[in-house]
Image (tube, rainbow, N blue to C red):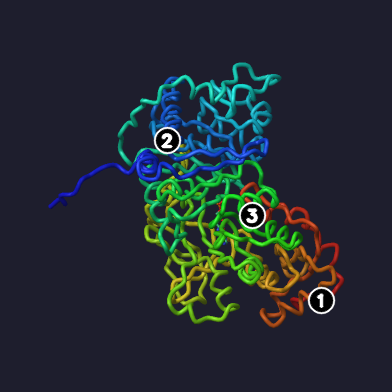
Amino acid sequence: MQGLMMDAPLLTSTILDHAERWHGEQKIVSRLHDGSIHSYTYSDAHTRTKKMAAALTALGVEQGDRVGTLAWNNFRHFELYFAISGMGAVTHTINPRLFEEQVTYIINHASNKVLFVDLSFVGLVEKVIGNCPKVEKIIVLCEQNEMPTDSPIADLICYEALIAAQTGDYVWPEFEERTAAALCYTSGTTGNPKGVLYSHRSTVLQTMATVAPDVLNISACDSLLPIVPMYHVNAWCQPFAAALVGAKLVLPGGGMDAASIYELMETEGVTLSAGVPTIWLMLLRYLAENNSKLTTVSRVSVGGSACPLSIIRDFDTKYGVNVIQAWGMTETSPLGTVVAPKPEHAKLDAETRYQVQSTQGRPVFGVDIRIVDDNGTELARDGVMSGHLQVRGYWVCSEYFNVDMDSPLENGWFPTGDIASISTSGFLRITDRAKDLIKSGGEWISSIELENAATSLAGVTEAAVIGVSHPRWDERPLMLIIANDSTLSKHDILAHLQDKFAKWWLPEDVLFVDDIPHTATGKISKLNLRQQYQDHFMQNNNEESTCA
Ligand code: ADP
């Protein structure tokens, strides 16, 4: 027997309609490319978005077409999120920090006929466009008087001129909720990037999950600053989440330096912000150097890579800010697990609580996880056994867009490539990417565990551990440290680690560096480091090994 309830498709346009109808007066604030601030309301955004949807139709965009965007977090990109998906096309967000060949590859692979481009990325488009024969129209996200005058690309179209030409009486089409809404490519450290195609249903469901108390607890009283870019994985669904609940949305544009972020946090009364660990390291350093305080921020969410314990502790002890760690992937839209405390955590002392916060947390309703051995047999959730992490759920990828390969699923689960354990109370701990595990003398060493332990030492800002070829032990761990205390030595680091790990786990060498390279999505670039240091132990194998 069927239930007798109304049935309406879960479409992204319904989120913006709700925002306009019930909290239309709430503000969306953006920092523009010249540093100035633009401010308007959800109601204004709704009107302009409908005009843009009409303009897309006039440009010849049809349902199912992939429309590319190369843009920072700003109000026009926000409008495009809703205009493109709302009219039935697919918002293909392109990560401008990828290599030019990858940008070219994904524009072609996605068959983008139309590209929307921020002024600051016109130069990038000029470099790749000669190899993108399918692109017919390029729209620049700016006012008419800001349009580039010396671009070699003929017929650039002005975004504001498109909006001005429309009346705003557009009516959203209604279609099936499993229709594609957005497309995002993985950064593809090995092989070509692969496209993950989100549906309206998966996006709306994840947005509803994101705002829940045990996830990010986002409400109409929040001022939300997503520093995580709108060009990667829908900025963790935060633009949708803000519109859903009527939170003030603060969009930082290209101003990703610590001073600009801090200023926005203070002037816009930001209560919640989201970013990868390197963003928070940068902000914490800025706050310390300038003796500044955060007067409104109460919590920050972090994901994309393991969050160093030093970030969690510094935010809490120095600024009274709660760090919420989450784990996810492009393929999980990305929400997977979140550190949501249970009643027993209320009694913990601060250091033990930081340990809980440094796990990857518990699955959100809508996502299930498990760990399996090499044969695919599920392993116990005992916090000890570690295995291959698999995931499934309403917003998890079932196959990649337009590739000639079998479904990536294994018995209905998506293999994440992460190695992890799950505690009896359900908390996930990522040990490593499978490819970053270090194999020393036939045994595995977790780079993330060593990094977490190193960053728990005062004076260590960031740590990276990689496996480097070793003449005797196959591979040995090499630790790179960024320190803010110039008196710290290799001896101090090893002394701090030695009671936490077996001797053979200890780094074979510790190097102090000024910089650790990061990928286009803000992760430590271990591939890059492995190449840079590949001969380190071949050249330096005279000292006694920590493994011996
Ligand atoms: P890509 O662009 O490479 O697809 P993703 O953003 O999809 O990048 O990366 C997903 C991977 O990032 C996960 O499989 C995991 O290895 C890592 N990751 C994400 N969040 C966390 C976290 N909180 N702790 C540890 N690793 C994380």
Q: Is residue 447 visible?
A: no
State which mark lies toward you, 2 or 1: 2
Quarter where residue 500 is shown? bottom right
What amino acid type should be assigned to the residue bearing mark 2? His
Q: Position of residue 345 (x, y in %)?
A: 48, 77
Label 2, on which residue?
46
The image quadrant that residue 443 belongs to is bottom right
Mark 1 lies within 8 Å of ligand 1 (Cβ measured): no
Q: Mark 2 or 1 closer to N-term?
A: 2
**Cβ atoms at labels 3 and 2 below 8 Å apart:** no
Residue drawn at (38%, 53%) of the image: 208
Residue appearing at x 63%, y 69% in the figure: 309
The image quadrant in which ligand 1 is located: bottom right
What residue does disc 1 label? Answer: 491
Q: Secondary structure at mark 2?
A: helix
* Contact check, label 2 and label 1, Cβ < 8 Å: no
Report crowding for label 3: few under 14, some 14 to 19, many 20 or more residues within 10 A (C-alpha).
some
Q: Secondary structure at mark 3?
A: loop
Task: Tell me the element at label 1.
Answer: helix
Q: Nearer the viewer, residue 224 or 499?
A: 224
Does residue 5 sit above or below 402 in this rendering?
Answer: below
| Residue depicted at x 66% and y 66% | 438
Q: Is residue 378 visible?
A: yes
Residue 523 - label:
3
Q: Is mark 3 within 8 Å of ligand 1?
A: yes
Q: Would you place residue 339 above or below residue 69 in this image?
A: below
Amino acid type at image mark 3: Lys
The x, y position of residue 316, in whole percent, is 61, 69
- For marks 3 and 1 on the same chain, the one whose residue lies earlier in the sequence: 1
Q: Name the residue furthest top.
A: 154
Q: Taking 483 as reference, is 218 left or right?
A: left
